[in-house]
Amino acid sequence: MRTARPRLTGSEVASRLASHVLVCDGAMGTMLHAGGVSLDRSLPELNLSHPELVRSIHRAYIAAGADIIETNTFGASRLRLARHGLGDQAAELNRAGARLAREARDEASRKAGLLVAGSISPVTPAGLGHRLAARELRDAFREQIEALYDGGVDLLLFETFGSLAELVEAIGVAQALGSVPVVAQMTFVEDGRSLGGDSPEEVATALANLGVAALGANCTLGPQGLLDVLAELARWTNLPLTAQPNAGPPTLTDGRFQYTASDPAYFGRQARRFVELGATLVGGCCGTTPAHIEAVAAAVSGMRRMPSPASVEGVRFHSVDSRGSAPADSDHAQVSPVLETAARGELIVACELPPPLGADALRAVSDAQALAASGCRAVIVGPVESTRVQASPASIALLVQQRVPELEVILTATTWEKSLMVLQADLLGTYAFGIRHVVCRTGTPPLHGDYPNAAGVWEVDSLGLIDVLRGLNEGRDYNGIPVGRPTTFVIGARVNPAASDFTHEVTTARRKLSSGASFLITPPVYDLEALERLLDAVDPPADVPVLLGLMPLHDLRHAEYLQHEVPDMAVPAGVLERMCRAGESGPAVGREVALDLFQAARAGGRVHGVVLSSASGDASEMAELLPHLLA
């Protein structure tokens, strides 16, 4: 029988965090769900009902090379357990979580010095925002922290905090109760700020004098997004840094979350970059597995803590995504400049216009004017993608149409954000003001942000939306009820050559065409052979234009981000190699790649136009490239 190892003192643990590079474990919830635990179950409760399952996950991470394992106590405060009827068991569940982690550690013979971190999440229940009084927060944190101390944890890991004020309260409670080192991690979204809107500078400044052993970021973002945040934190603190990114953004498939950065080798390479920025604790969050942690451990083996850089290259927050005249009332025929241009054999050139954040809707107008001046004849107003407040795509589409009449405005409509009744009402409203072209997308709700508890509606998907528009064109609503004069919407649909399930993509594309899609748009494409395979399989009618998504790459980092962290995107090895050789000439080479793809696609004779977009939403970047496409 193994005996428990002697416990390190708080100062010894803090010293290790300050001088060594330690590998933390990965996701507990992902592994539990993979083991059959339902998404709606309380995971900390498994510490009592299924202790061996929890212990086996600890063992797997230890075997993968983790130096720190976290207790299965995320969300184990009285206030968050209450929704499962477990509030009164908070202390017991936390002590059990600590015990299971210690048992797994004591069984391990790989090496000495393995640490157990008590995992603590925000205690504010979903839906309450910041309405809890400071005393309620402190009481909930105190109960959980005391139980973890009793359970024998070596350090506390506060993680996935969106509110800086709540994190400060939690740290204060921990410091008042004992001398166990505290690691503090906020979660940031794609604009580089926390869910509560705090910048890395504000976070680092607020935590600087609170006695934390290390600070950093975890969750929500994939490796590259978190790298940007860590680079900014490094500018404002000399404390050891921590990084535990997600395995890319999740997608929900057949009731289970899947993550895009599934390549452990890629994940490991990014971990080295975290250490180079000053991280001493690197691990994973949602979607990561022992395979990811094994890759991280191998990648950072032998590395020591790097001094914080004196200055950091300007931070770039990739916001990469593929966004994607009055009718003749007498016969309700479709009058479409897009379809007419294709029918004449001329090139359709459209640019993607993402809705600007906040109330600065006039920015979209100035961007549209700049694009029109460079030869663009159509703009596609993209869907809501940011986690921040912004004007609706329909409002932007109407504004641009009124202010820039020389442009044809194509609206992207997504189905997740509205009920079926509101969708139809909005579509009829935009139609009344002259919007005729609509691209139908299902879309995905942004994760967290200004409204972290918002959820999707999902009454229909993109196929259902095509049916809605076809019904309106036939003078009826989705339920077959007459709506009076028929509309003349021109329906667009997305097809993706890089879809992970090719057979499903082909079947869906055919259904979109049979349901009434009049033109097809791809996301940014870097593999024309994949596009040819898709068009061969779908075989769209000759009168259905295909518009190629085209987005210039900025550098190798951008290309790798698309390949590894954006769902259903593919960048061939040849393009990656070309961007690797480009070095500092990355933007110029990226434009060359885009032009080469465009010319090859046009020469193939199956592409009728392009949808030009910018990774950063920069209209000037698109305006610069437009003359080369129109030459």
Image (tube, helix red, strand yellow):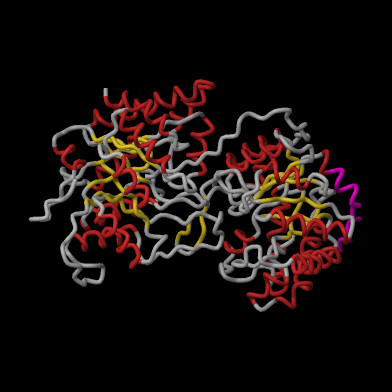
Q: Residue furthest left?
A: 330
Q: Is residue 392 above or below residue 577?
A: below
Nearest to the observer: residue 424 or residue 339: 424
Query: Residue 291 location, x and y as percent?
Result: 62, 48
Queried whether the magenta region covers residue 379, the answer comes back as no
Residue name at image x 11 percent, y 51 percent? 328
Nearest to the observer: residue 361 or residue 73: 361
Q: Quadrant of the N terminus?
A: bottom right
In-image side of 7 versus 445 (left or right): right
Q: Is residue 52 above or below residue 243?
A: below
Quarter of the image for residue 369 reads top left
Residue name at image x 25 percent, y 71 percent? 479
Quarter of the image for residue 77 reads bottom right
The stretch of residues the image draws in magenta is: 1-16
Quarter of the image for residue 50 reads bottom right
Query: Residue 553 location, x and y as percent?
Result: 45, 31
Nearest to the observer: residue 118 or residue 136: 136
Query: Residue 586 location, x and y as percent?
Result: 49, 24
Q: Quadrant of the C terminus?
A: top left
Query: Residue 185 location, x and y as percent?
Result: 71, 50
Residue name at image x 81 percent, y 61 percent? 102
Queried whether the magenta region covers residue 15, the answer comes back as yes
